[in-house]
Amino acid sequence: MVNAEDRLMQWLRDAHAMEEQAATMLDALAKRIEHYPDVRAKIEEHLAVTREQSRRLQSCIATRGGDTSTIKDMAGKMTAMGQGVSGMFATDEIVKGAMSLYTFENMEIAAYRVLVAAAEHVGDTATAAVLQGILEEEIEAAETVGAMLPDITARYLTREEATGIEAKR
Ligand code: MG
Ligand code: FE
C-alpha cells in the first residue's frame, strides 16, 4: 500500500526529472537554430522559465520533507527527452523540433493537472498553489508554440523552395 503523500512525492520527483529533461532539450534545440531567430528567442525564454520551475519543484520537495540529494540521479530516468530530439538532424528539423516541443508542453500540462489534484487531495494548499502557477506557465508555452506552428511551416516551405537557402534549422 502506498499512501497519497508518498505518491505525491514520487510525482514531484518525476516532474523535477521532466523539467531537467526539458531544460536539456530546449537548450539543445535553441543552440541548433540558425535561420529562425524569433523561434530561438521563444525557446530561450521558456528555457529560463523551465530552470525556475525545476528550482521551485526542488523547494516543494524539500518543504514536504523529501530528500533532494538524489534528485540529480532521478533526472536520468526520464526518457521523454529522447522524443524531443528525435527530429534533430532531419532535413525538416525546425518543423519536427517545434512539433516535439508542442507535444512536450502538452505532456507537462497533463503532469501538472495531476500534481495539482494530488496536492489538493492531501490538503497541501501551498504546494498546490506552486503547481498551479507552473501549470499556467505550461499552458501559455503550449499555446505559444501551437500558434507558431503554421508560421514556422510556411516559412520552412518557402525557404526550402528557394534555391541556395538552407531551410532545415
Ligand atoms: Mg516545464
Ligand atoms: Fe514547459
Image (spheres, rainbow, N blue to C red):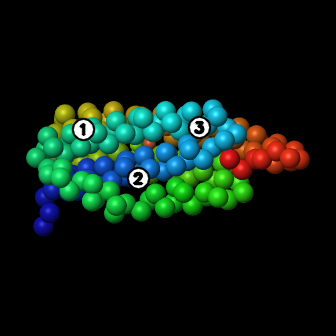
Judge by depth and name the residue closer to the eye, 124 or 49. Answer: 49
For badge 3, the amino acid type reads Arg
Looking at the image, tell me whether mark 3 or mark 1 is earlier in sequence order. 3
In the image, residue 79 above or below residue 55: below
Q: Can you tell me which quadrant of the image ligand 1 is in?
A: top left
Give the spatial CA distance, label 2 vs label 1.
22 Å
Q: Label 2 sits on what residue type?
A: Gln
Residue 67 in picture, x, y percent from top left: 14, 52
Residue positioned 60% across, 51% down in the render? 97
Left or right: 11 as drawn, with respect to 107: left
Q: Residue at x 42, y 35 (%)?
A: 48
Secondary element at tag 1: helix
Q: Residues within 10 Å of mark 1 (few under 14, many from 20)?
A: many
Residue picked out by circle 2: 21
Residue labelled with disc 1? 128
When the figure is inspected, residue 34 is found, relative to residue 77, above or below; the finding is: above
Left or right of 115 in this view: 36 = right
Amino acid under label 1? Ala
The one of 107 and 92 positioned closer to us in this rendering:
92
Q: Nearer the viewer, mark 2 or mark 1?
A: 2
Q: Which quadrant would the N terminus be assigned to in this image? A: bottom left
Q: Position of residue 81 (x, y in %)?
A: 46, 57
Residue 49, by quadrant, is top left
For mark 2, give the secondary structure. helix
- The residue pinned by badge 3 equals 40
